[in-house]
Image: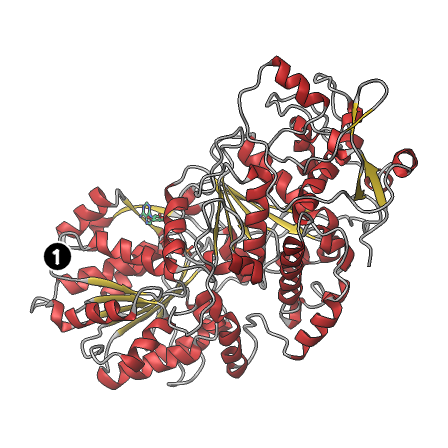
Amino acid sequence: MAADESLLLNISEDWTFPGFHRPEHKKFSRSVGAKERKGTPKQAKTTKRKFQGDNEGPPPKRKNEIFLVPAKKTDVKEVERTVKGKPEGLISPKKHPAVRTNEGQVERPFIKTSSLFKNNPEIPEIHRATVKQVREKVFTSDSFHELGLHPHLISTINSVLKMASMTSVQKQSIPSLLEGRDALVRSQTGSGKTLAYCIPVVQSLQAMKSRIQRSDGPYALVLVPTRELALQSFDTIQKLLKPFTWIVPGVLMGGEKRKSEKARLRKGINILISTPGRLVDHIKSTKNIHFRRIQWLIIDEADRILDLGFEKDITVILNAINAECEKRQNVLLSATLTEGVTRLADISLHNPVSISVSDETCDQRTKGYKIAGESGPLRTSAEPDGFAVPEKLQQHVTLVPSKLKLVTLAAFILGRCEFEKDHKLIVFFSSCELVEFYYHLFLQTLLGSSTAPASGQSPSASSRLKFLRLHGNMEQEERTAVFQEFSLSKSGILLCTDVAARGLDLPQVTWIVQYNAPSSPAEYIHRIGRTARIGCHGSSLLILAPSEAEYVNSLASHKINVSEIKMEDILSILATDDRFKARRWGNKKSRSVGPQEIRERATVLQTAFEDYVHASAERVSWAKKALQSFIRAYATYPKDLKHIFHVRSLHLGHVAKSFGLRDAPQNLNASLGNKRKSKPKRPDLHKKTQSKHRLAEILRSEYSSGMEAGDAKVKKQNKHGKPSNHALQS
Ligand SMILES: Nc1ncnc2c1ncn2[C@@H]1O[C@H](COP(=O)(O)OP(=O)(O)OP(=O)(O)O)[C@@H](O)[C@H]1O
């Protein structure tokens, strides 16, 4: 199936000197009408007629090597040469054989580039009622001194963690937990839930009459869904334990050799932080693990742990603990309390206190949500019926036809990270394959590859563009390195799956971009919650296709308000970068750039992506596999979102463009048909336990314990930043 009819542009001559001045540019007006959105038909036709004769047949063949024109200082002569013929810049399409005309001008053959702006679906107006968002006050004016903690613990909080006053959730939770109560704790993302449980655990363990010995084994067990979160929680506990050196924390998270974990278990870990899968592995295979002295069981991101089908693992863990110790304190935490958490609470909490921070419930500790029976339902009537979103988080949505999705994302990244300072972006995708694909595509095209050092940084003018990626198919060593690098970095772009959606506290993230919509409003909340933490400012952008516009209403029904950014406004950033200038607009730098030229610049950018992908059969096959992975993930939206996200509503030819493919792969439908027989499911909270177990299998690659045999992992990126062999095969 052809992607679309073609607009023919003299792309290879479109490249000019990549100056970084910011010419005045005209933004697309918000009132761009449907007619204008579709392009100016007359102009497009003229362009087509003009160039058609020169370009029958496929684009010229290219070598397999990565194209790149390294940025270097250029003198005036060099600039002139560049303007006349050779493309130079961060994105540099393959060079085509030059032809000299009578006038001595260098002419190049034309590249056939499908029109990005024709035959797109109409972008609907977003109509939704404005909802009142649930707000929570982050900080209180109360200090930690009021809690009656050990003075050394208070001074550690003040001097090591540099915290003076408690957050609302800490003020409400810590006293209850110090009283010995079980608890179900909900407060917005980035509000300090980690310390809300860590402080009481440390306070109670350091106060034990007979001093804890390392060889005693675990007194507290903390379960978290991902390895990065395990590391992060471990780090916090380790800091709190500074004055109490006899209490030993430890983390089990997979990716490490089982032998060394066993050795650490044998020596003794008093506060054990683990992912459920990894702990179950040890319960089944490690003699030295025991739970005789467990006094605390903490399940962080409790709803996620259930979503992932870890219920079976949790049952194994609870049975193992219950068999050895009867009485302990249990705490479940999450920013999103869902039906799943209530079920988990039913099986794991005893006479719990339910703590929920919101304007309505603030300062009103609601105690005594009793379990009607050992397996009866927990009543959580005080819960607000919407999710709380940090007050300083600006949420946006943009409606983008599939064909334009890739250039819109690239323009958005360039706009934030190249032309503005100190932006830290996280971009969420729906699968590991998509993350790998776009990571390498951006690295090779937006940065140019062969001079880019292994960290993904270029010495060129685009040095502000630093791409990193994180997903469950990477080697643990690299996952940890990326997590730490992005944490410490002041700027950069992290492409990731939902493995980074929960709990991660990455400082100073300014934007969250959701390139693929999340599978539930709860996941939306957690993804955007990686910014605007602990009272800071932050923004989010959800990219939806026109056919997915209804999702905005779905979010509104959970009291989530998003405001629209027009796609044209995102693309208008291309006006500030003359690397994308089409030649026919000349070299004058002072004139303003109109909508038609921005469309052509977007086409130049798209062409660079397509050139990269079509430079070899191997890359085309890689892009096809990424496309297939996208479609597979698209088929897994839960039933209640199927009317919005349905594979049938995808235009494959258009979607293919967002993978740099010029045409929709011919055999995709057939292969999708085969997949449908064993259709994987997304997490669906309303599904029965059995289906959750199946989910666990499907999502295992993202959240695996790291012990599975034959786990296909993405090998460390080679030093040229090229797709690794595995990435090409995945
Ligand atoms: N009392 C406090 N004063 C200042 N900063 C704090 C305080 N408590 C926690 N923080 C900081 O707030 C940030 C967010 O905390 P934390 O990660 O515990 O949030 P969370 O509620 O668990 O978020 P999520 O729901 O996303 O997991 C961390 O950087 C933490 O160090």
| Residue 421, percent from left and from top | 49, 30
Q: Quadrant of the C terminus?
A: bottom right
Q: Is residue 319 left or right of residue 358?
A: left
Q: Is residue 364 visible?
A: no
| Residue 616, percent from left and from top | 66, 51
The residue under the point 43% across, 84% down is 376
Q: Is residue 188 above or below residue 266?
A: above
| Residue 48, percent from left and from top | 89, 38
Asked which colour scheme the image uses, the reply is: secondary structure
The residue under the point 52% across, 60% down is 726
Callout 1: SS:
loop
The residue under the point 63% across, 78% down is 678
Total count of labels:
1
281, 243: nearer the viewer: 281
Q: Is residue 528 left or right of residue 366?
A: right
Residue assigned mark 1? 245
Q: Is residue 284 left or right of residue 23?
A: left
| Residue 419, percent from left and from top | 56, 29
74, 423: nearer the viewer: 74
Q: Quadrant of the N terminus?
A: bottom right
The residue type indicated by label 1 comes to Thr
Mark 1 crowdedness (10 Å alpha carbons): few <14, some 14-19, many ≥20: few
682, 485: nearer the viewer: 485
Q: Is residue 384 visible?
A: yes
Q: Residue furthest top?
A: 76
- Report which quarter residue 563 is drawn in: top right
